[in-house]
Amino acid sequence: MDDALLSELLAAKLRDAMLGLDGAVSVPSAEALDADFARARADFDACRYAGLAVRLPRLIRAGHALTANGDGADHCSRLAQTYLVATRMLVKLDEQQLGWMAADRARQLAEASGDALAVAECARQLSVLARKAGWHDQALSIALSAADDPQLRGSGRAGAAERGLLIQSAAYTVARRGDRDGMRSLTDEAAAIAKELGGATLLRDHGGGFSPLTVQLHRISAENYAGDPMAALDAARSISLKALPSVERRSRCLSDVAAALDRLGRRQECVRTLLAAEHHAPEETHTRPVVKMLISSLLVSGPTSTELRGLAQRSGVLS
């Protein structure tokens, strides 16, 4: 399938699964579901979105069939985790209505299963969606309230790492408001948590985990959103792509760098960086609306090249 059509396919399949429009459901064993979910999470981390278009709807249908039968907290927890992956994917695709639906279902299921880490991650995703809707005060409140929750503070190393991610989300929000000092203060707070943890902390509901390196990755887009693309590039210089924990994180790094270069008018470097992102994660580069908008703006804002036109065609921006 043409990568440029993947976003529509994935969103449509998730929509129909969440609405229960797929008819009879065959429910595999718990072991098979766990294996299928592990593959879905690996697909997300590797930016294999064609695989997600098959696995996530299947997991949602099966999860609802099991929870409807009252089959226990384990199934609620798995379904909550499935909805969290779906939410992160829908946020990437800028499908906000479906994203809200998925995030709210994830929250209800996480609360029902008593999973404090999943509840906190749901709050982070709701904060992201609120920020995208322009509800900055609410986004900030959601993230910081979740970071201060006593249950999360009592969840050990993983809880501290999740607090760091929530504080990073708050920093993005104040960056969107143009508050550079506030963004840097919150990012420094997240960096202090990462330093105290003393290395990378893997998180079940966030494939990138949390570490000083991921905080630095966050600084790139945060500085750019706060209006300082040169500071964004300075943050990027200290990051080795190979050291980042997943293809998805490498692609995010490159697309954020490309956005900063575009703001500085460095067109050729911007295009080269987008081509590098495409090399690492073609499906991500061809489907994310924010990347496609950047490619589209490059086409109309100055001289084009064979490489740029080819990228635009592969992304469905240019027919």
Image (cartoon, helix red, strand yellow):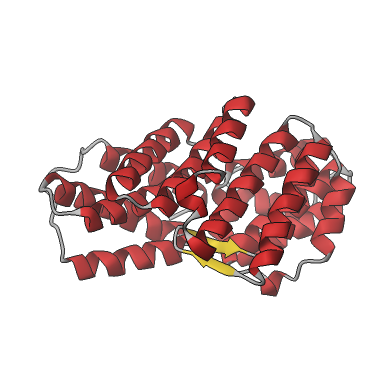
Residue 121 visible in rendering = no
- Answer left or right for 40 relative to 300: left
The one nearer the camera, 204 or 10, is 204
Quadrant of the image containing the C terminus: top right
- Answer left or right for 107 relative to 244: left
Tell me residue 150's x, y (percent): 49, 47
Residue 220, compared with residue 132, is above or below; it is: below
Name of the residue lying farthest toward the bottom = 242
The one nearer the camera, 121 or 279, is 121
Residue 54, compared with residue 106, is above or below; it is: below
Number of numbered tags placed on the structure image = 0
Quadrant of the image containing the N terminus: bottom left
Tell me residue 22's x, y (percent): 19, 43
Which residue is rendered at x = 48% and y = 41% of the image? 123
Tell me residue 81's x, y (percent): 37, 54
Which residue is rendered at x = 62% and y = 53% of the image? 164
- Answer left or right for 268 relative to 200: right
Residue 286 visible in rendering = yes
- Answer left or right for 272 relative to 11: right
The one nearer the camera, 106 or 13, is 106
Which residue is rendered at x = 33% and y = 44% of the image? 111
Indicate the quadrant where residue 292 lies.
top right
Residue 135, compared with residue 250, is above or below; it is: above
